[in-house]
Image (cartoon, rainbow, N blue to C red):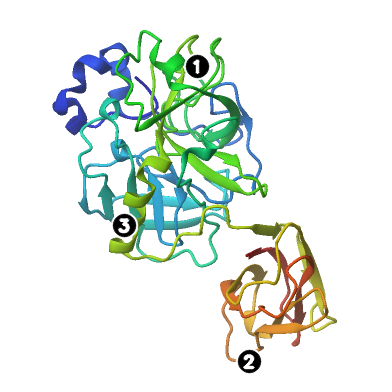
Amino acid sequence: MRKFLFKASLMAAGLATALAATAAHAAAAPPPSEPGDITPQVVGGTLAAKGDYPWLVHLSMGCGGAMYTEQLVLTAAHCLDGTGPDTSIGVIYGVVDRQDPARITRTSTYVHSAPGFTGVTTGKDWALVKLNSPIVGAATLPIATTTAYNNGTFDIMGWGGTSEGGNSVNRYASKAQVPFVDDTACSAQASYPNLVKSDMLCAGYKAGGVDTCQGDSGGPMVRRDANNNWIQVGIVSWGSGCARPDKYGIYTEVSTFAAAIAAAAAELGGGTPPPPGGKVFENANNVNIADAGAAVTSSIAVTGVTGNAPSTLKVDVDIKHTWRGDLVIDLVAPDGTAYRLKNSSSNDSADNVIATYTVNASTEVANGTWKLKVQDVARYDTGYIDSWKLTF
């Protein structure tokens, strides 16, 4: 078994025999890598770049996760100690380097583990972590609601071990790709005769060499949909060792639990998840904003959307600025129509504009070039457009 730091409660639940081969993973995690020690984490992977997986989070107990809403993280049940209030979990969002000063941090307030979860080998390995406050404008990851995406090549990522038994918490996240493995081939392997086919997905190479590992638990396994948007199909759960030949990675099949996850999220509160297959377009290129100067723009080309834009067009804005009250922000449609998102305010001296706006753009044709227009109308403070995105 691998990919997580075993909890005493799980061992007591009867997993001791199944986990005996790698009992060393039950020990406390080694310290994080020293600054400057930049090595891949996912076995056989490469370093992830900032922005590759904007919804990815790191949890302080040594697990990963993904933003399900702006206040809920989807992760693995085996990372947690059951359902109930929990203020002990630290969350890092928005970076691949856990020491990046730009990281956004939160703490947990409550966790919800899947009802009936007793251990990774019996399935139902999913959970939600509620944060103490929303990360406004956070990128969120839609989850699959059908098995249509259980095929092809998947992306895996995390801060876990580079090798079986190695560091389980590293400073830098990395990534890799693994192919889908059907249930028949996966359950034929000696380690997985009792694979719960309705609950689990298998992925990896028969020859091994590429895999998630200890410390990657709870992180998402994703692929692109027909519109080239990310969709989550799995949650890192378990496996026999890391990247061994004939030992595939086992992932929670998200589509099996999509309705249960949505129901739990509604009960917890914390926002509405994005629809599966929702079309998201983003520009993450920085644009400097002139101090008390002319307006600047950042463009997004929208394609493949049928008809007009929705009446609830979602505009996520991330602008770094040392006096946000100086800023006037507009969304400009392809036909040149401007929609005011934010007015200037001499009394608003706070830093940055990290916000989500909703625009009734139902009279606008969706396809075309949309622009975020920003003007600094007062002197002395400066900044830049960090990123922005449209969700149709």
Q: Which amino acid is tagged 3?
A: Ala
Q: Is residue 260 left or right of residue 309?
A: left
Q: Disc 1 or disc 3, which is closer to the eye?
A: 3
What quarter of the picture does the N terminus occupy? top left
Residue plotted at (75% across, 82% down): 376
Quick check: 171 above or below 300? above
In-front residue for pair 152/164: 152
Left or right: 108, with 331 as reference point: left
Discs 2, 1 touching: Cβ within 8 Å: no
Quadrant in the picture for residue 357: bottom right
Query: Residue at left 51%, top 32%?
Result: 33
Density class for disc 2 (Cα within 10 Å; few <14, some 14-19, many ≥20) is few
User: Is 71 drawn above or below residue 32 in the view shown?
Assistant: below
What residue is shown with label 2?
Answer: 346
Measured Cα–Cα span from mark 1 to mark 3: 35 Å
Q: Identify the residue under disc 3.
A: 263
Please give left or right for residue 15 compared with residue 29 in the image: left
Furthest residue in direction bottom, as rendered? 346
For label 3, the crowd category at 10 Å Cα-Cα, with few meaning under 14, some 14 to 19 and many 20 or more, is: few
Q: Nearer the viewer, residue 199 or 30?
A: 199
Residue toward you, 130 or 29:
130
Return the residue at label 1: 243
* Circle 1/circle 3 CB separation < 8 Å: no
* Rendering coords of residue 204 (x, y %): 53, 21
Q: Position of residue 127 (x, y in %)?
A: 32, 46
Between residue 76 and residue 145, name the one nearer to us: 145
Report if residue 37 is visible in the image. Answer: no
Determine the residue positioned at 43% across, 17% down: 184
